[in-house]
Image: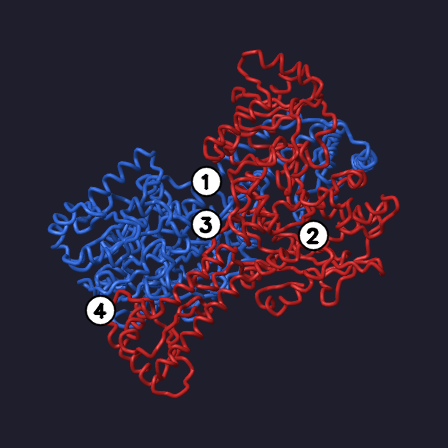
Chain colours: A red, B blue
């Protein structure tokens, strides 16, 4: 079901009921972009705090345009789930005058991608539901309360009426005089005034009409006009003021908009499932909660208060035993894989009124549909894991210990040895003794690194700048001897251990007040080069690689098409 | 006439002819936003370099979505102009793989504004004409040439074929075998492969089919697929390579797109007219020429090479004798004023095929229409100035000395004493002896400043931060005595001369490598407060102001609605 600002309040109650009555929820977001220009890209030797920091700085200036929410309710007798997929259009339009005038980033390739999948930008900009972070809501409420308590104690600069405005102003006064004499008249509309004229009217009314109240409204074409309310006496004036204040509080409540849905998810404490969901969660937190903290541990702690139970289906798909049967874990491909042996897809019945989607008619990359698909995949994967149990547990529920192992672990793309960030505990610590930090002259290319490490077998390069890289040995047994030999030599290059370099970098960062401006975090010198090859999620890194070498992969060089890895974030394959 | 990527090349020749044959051109732009969050706002005591710097840093991250160009050709016999208004939809889609993946900012209120005026975002994102800066075009061309010269000398990482991909790859090889045996076959399309499979096909073809060439294409839904070309012998292979190289150069030429129109305007050396056009010019330069320089003088010199003759109708409207008859100089209001006495509107005939616009049927805030209106106003203002001459010169042409006084001066909004920036010479130097820099405790409000300066008459405040402001005396005669008294006192506040403070600031800026982080350039502490009152373009500053004081206008305080000045940039009134 599409939900816009036009049917949001009509549907809100049933949305809240669907959330409250669900067995689990699934979500998905569509964004105006994925990574900022000049931001640091995700890399295979990132640690969870590094990855968080890169995503926070590189991704959250974009806007969340569409939020998919699907409520799944199990029918254990009939062995099926009933699904209610909602597709919310979101836009922070400034319908409330004191609402923040949000600036956001867009990325051309993401806009292209959405356009190619039929995304309706006119609809989202025109009909999007507004929202506020909890912090903004609180600020605006305090402001309104203060303003209301100061009502009638305001004074403002009074300016002399310019010669050419006198006639205009007299005309307005005549209209107001007539209006004030009428009984039970509708408020008076004063249109077609420019800013100067509106100011003159305000000061005139304040001066001459103590029983009148002005307010400014914004019309359909964003033109401003005035509304004048008239009272018979002080009592009626007080009533007008009270009504206006109540009206303004209601308008603020409307501006809170979609944030109410997130608040209801929090309150329900339901399990929330997503596919490769870390970016969705970052956006949810920054759009509906408040600015993201710099520190990953702080992020974990506030996220747990908003989403107490999360599961990432991409992590499930990349973990045994499911991993053995799911070769490609992008949502569409994974869903397809789950339709046939050894899997046994769970029956999903779409609830009446939600017929927009079915698993057959694909609307892939519409948030509501993707949320629906994600939940369906989750149900089928749970069933598979249940079938593996002894005794067999059909319809394994999220409360099962088998599922619990996945709770609050969000998948991290393309890190071979740390597959996820743990939201409710410390992250994995891994041994990277086979990884070295290498600095070299800027003329070096991949082939030079391959030559340098040739005696120790195949390597994986993760470029940090045009004069440094992390190099990982494929054959970990050679780590010690490689380090002993290469770290001693003192040529044009320098090799240090990953641990040593990482410790130093972390130290530097913390002395620099956690601002990330070390060499590794600098943007690449040439902005046209973004396709640094990294192992793909399907495990290409683990495949033995012959030593024919590419020079295409080095930062600072524009890359020929197609032969190297893919773009770091690629909507069509990564999700 | 609407021009999108679908009819751009069809129309290009006639567009270039219209430019070349015109008497003058008028332009207008529509943007995704006006000022960045936390950027410094334009202020009444800005100098031209300060204003340029603020606009460069605050405005040019937004996108130019629509470019209006209207070619006006005088018919001196018939005493009329023929107009050809073009409305170009622009979007930097990544249709060319090596094209930059542009990131750009949007501002909610600007999106709201465009939506309320019927702007079609789906059309611009789907059908927008691409463009490149001259610099990008040059880089991409060099890159392609280098790539073509290296053709067939590439080598890349060869990976072992994973077990589960062997069958797939054998199937592909069979298809290729059949294809290579056929005569004059169409190139072979290989669809539905993931990234890993495409890589495997590439390495297989390189290894086993020396007479075949692969290329990757992107489909409608952004999915990638492969095309295989087959040759009989080395000669045919070389022909395929040449054709592909030519094709790639042509694709680059298509990506240059709209920039060709700007290049044609440059080449034509025609007069280009705009209304309040400095932002349009900044966007044109940064979108079609290259990154804007930090220094205003550098900007002037490169702008003169691209637009050798510019006229701003807002400056004309705010300069005597026109100023005396044009009270409001926003485009719509100015156009309306120019329709009646003492003005005598010039007849504008819309050329056949350009019937979309007429001066009666308003499409205000569509770039093509605004350009058309701007040119019409310019023609009528020229006629008026001609009528004022002795002898009367009907149809005053841009080459007239009367008009020449306006050439290459761009209007600066809301600076009382420096109305324009001069592109082909030094800017005005003005005396600001009546202006003081004041620092004070953060508790101070406007009323405290009014009290402080009370003995010297009315003042104008321009807040710089929550502890500093420029204060201008309305009565300049009191400057000396005010300075003598206030600068000596040593209380909680400090008063220095504008000249002293400005000199110091400029010094600080130049030692800080021109990065603007002095106190005055810091973002306001409270982001919800943007409505610092400034004199409006209609001259409110010059009106005597009674000393009833507002406290609403101080930065750091959220402002009640409506009683103070307007938003600093306001599409509906400023343009």
Q: Earlier in the sequence, mark 3 or mark 1?
A: 3
Residues at marks 3 and 4 on the same chain: no
Q: Quadrant of the N terminus of chain A?
A: bottom right
Residues under numbered marks 3 and 4 in contact, where contact means CB atoms less than 8 Å apart: no
Q: Position of residue B383 (x, y in %)?
A: 27, 64
Residues under numbered marks 3 and 2 in contact, where contact means CB atoms less than 8 Å apart: no
Q: Quadrant of residue B457?
A: bottom left
**Disc 3 marks which residue?**
B62
Q: Is residue B191 visible?
A: no
Q: Position of residue A146 (x, y in %)?
A: 39, 63
Q: Quadrant of residue A530?
A: top right
Residues under numbered marks 2 and 4 in contact, where contact means CB atoms less than 8 Å apart: no
| Viewer-proximal residue among A182 and B173 | A182
Residues under numbered marks 1 and 2 in contact, where contact means CB atoms less than 8 Å apart: no
Q: Please give the chain letter of the residue carrying mark 3.
A: B
- Residue A426 in the image: above or below residue B103: above
**Disc 4 marks which residue?**
A160
Q: Which mark is residue B134?
A: 1
Q: Position of residue B385 (x, y in %)?
A: 24, 62
Residues at marks 1 and 4 on the same chain: no
Crowd tier of the residue under label 1, counting other residues whose Cα lies within 10 Å: few below 14, some 14–19, many 20 or above: some
Q: Please give the chain letter of the residue carrying mark 1.
A: B
Q: Position of residue A108 (x, y in %)?
A: 55, 47
Crowd tier of the residue under label 4, counting other residues whose Cα lies within 10 Å: few below 14, some 14–19, many 20 or above: few
Q: Is residue A225 left or right of residue A113?
A: left
Mark 3 element type: loop
Q: Is residue B358 visible?
A: yes
**Disc 2 marks which residue?**
A271
C-alpha separation, residue under disc 1 versus residue under disc 4: 52 Å
Name the residue located 80 percent from the left edge and 50 percent from the top edge: A396
């Amino acid at each position: 079901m599409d939900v816009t600002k036009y049917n949001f309040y009509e549907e809100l109650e049933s949305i809240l009921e669907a959330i409250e009555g669900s067995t689990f929820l699934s979500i998905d977001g569509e964004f105006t972009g994925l990574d900022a220009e000049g931001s640091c890209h995700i890399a295979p030797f990132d640690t969870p705090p590094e990855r968080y920091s890169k995503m926070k700085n590189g991704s959250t200036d974009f806007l969340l345009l569409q939020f998919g929410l699907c409520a799944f309710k199990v029918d254990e007798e009939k062995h099926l789930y009933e699904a209610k997929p909602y597709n919310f259009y979101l836009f922070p339009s400034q319908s409330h005058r004191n609402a923040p005038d949000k600036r956001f980033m867009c990325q051309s390739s993401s806009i292209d991608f959405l356009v190619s999948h039929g995304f309706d930008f006119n609809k989202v900009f025109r009909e999007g539901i507004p929202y506020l972070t909890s912090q903004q809501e609180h600020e605006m409420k305090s402001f309104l309360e203060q303003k209301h308590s100061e009502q009638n104690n305001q004074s403002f600069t009074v300016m002399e009426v310019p010669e050419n405005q006198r006639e205009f102003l007299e005309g307005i006064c005549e209209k107001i005089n007539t209006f004030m004499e009428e009984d039970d008249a509708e408020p008076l509309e004063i249109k077609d005034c420019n800013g100067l004229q509106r100011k003159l009217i305000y000061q005139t009314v304040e001066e001459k009409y103590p029983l009148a109240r002005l307010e400014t409204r914004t019309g359909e074409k964003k033109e401003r006009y005035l509304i004048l309310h008239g009272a018979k006496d002080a009592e009626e004036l007080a009533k007008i003021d009270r009504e206006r204040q109540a009206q303004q509080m209601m308008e603020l409540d409307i501006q809170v908009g979609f944030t109410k849905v997130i608040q209801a998810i929090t309150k329900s404490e339901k399990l929330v499932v997503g596919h490769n969901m870390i970016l969705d969660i970052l956006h949810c937190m920054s759009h509906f909660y408040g600015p993201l903290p710099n520190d990953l541990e702080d992020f974990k702690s506030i996220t747990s208060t908003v989403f107490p139970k999360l599961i990432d289906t991409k992590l499930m798909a990349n973990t045994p035993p499911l991993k053995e049967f799911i070769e490609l874990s992008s949502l569409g491909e994974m869903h397809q894989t789950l339709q046939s042996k050894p899997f046994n897809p769970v029956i999903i019945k779409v609830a009446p009124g939600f017929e927009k989607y079915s698993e057959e008619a694909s609307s892939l990359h519409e948030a509501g549909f993707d949320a629906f698909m994600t939940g369906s995949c989750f149900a089928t994967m749970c069933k598979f894991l249940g079938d593996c149990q002894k005794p067999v547990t059909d319809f394994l529920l999220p409360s099962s210990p088998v599922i619990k192992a996945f709770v609050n672990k969000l998948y991290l793309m393309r890190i071979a040895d740390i597959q996820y960030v743990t939201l409710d505990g410390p992250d994995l610590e891994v041994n990277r003794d086979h990884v070295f930090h290498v600095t070299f002259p800027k003329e070096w290319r991949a082939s030079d690194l391959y030559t340098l490490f040739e005696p120790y077998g195949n390597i994986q390069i993760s470029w940090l700048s045009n004069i440094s890289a992390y190099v990982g040995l494929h054959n970990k047994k050679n780590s010690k001897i490689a380090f002993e030999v290469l770290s001693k030599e003192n040529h044009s290059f320098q090799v240090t251990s990953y641990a040593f370099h990482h410790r130093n970098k972390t130290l530097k960062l913390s002395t620099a007040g956690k601002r990330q401006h070390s060499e590794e975090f600098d943007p690449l010198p040439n902005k046209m080069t973004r396709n640094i090859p990294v192992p793909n999620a399907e495990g290409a890194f683990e495949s033995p690689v012959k030593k024919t070498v590419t020079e295409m992969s080095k930062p600072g060089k524009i890359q020929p098409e197609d032969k190297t890895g893919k773009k770091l974030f690629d909507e069509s394959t990564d999700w």
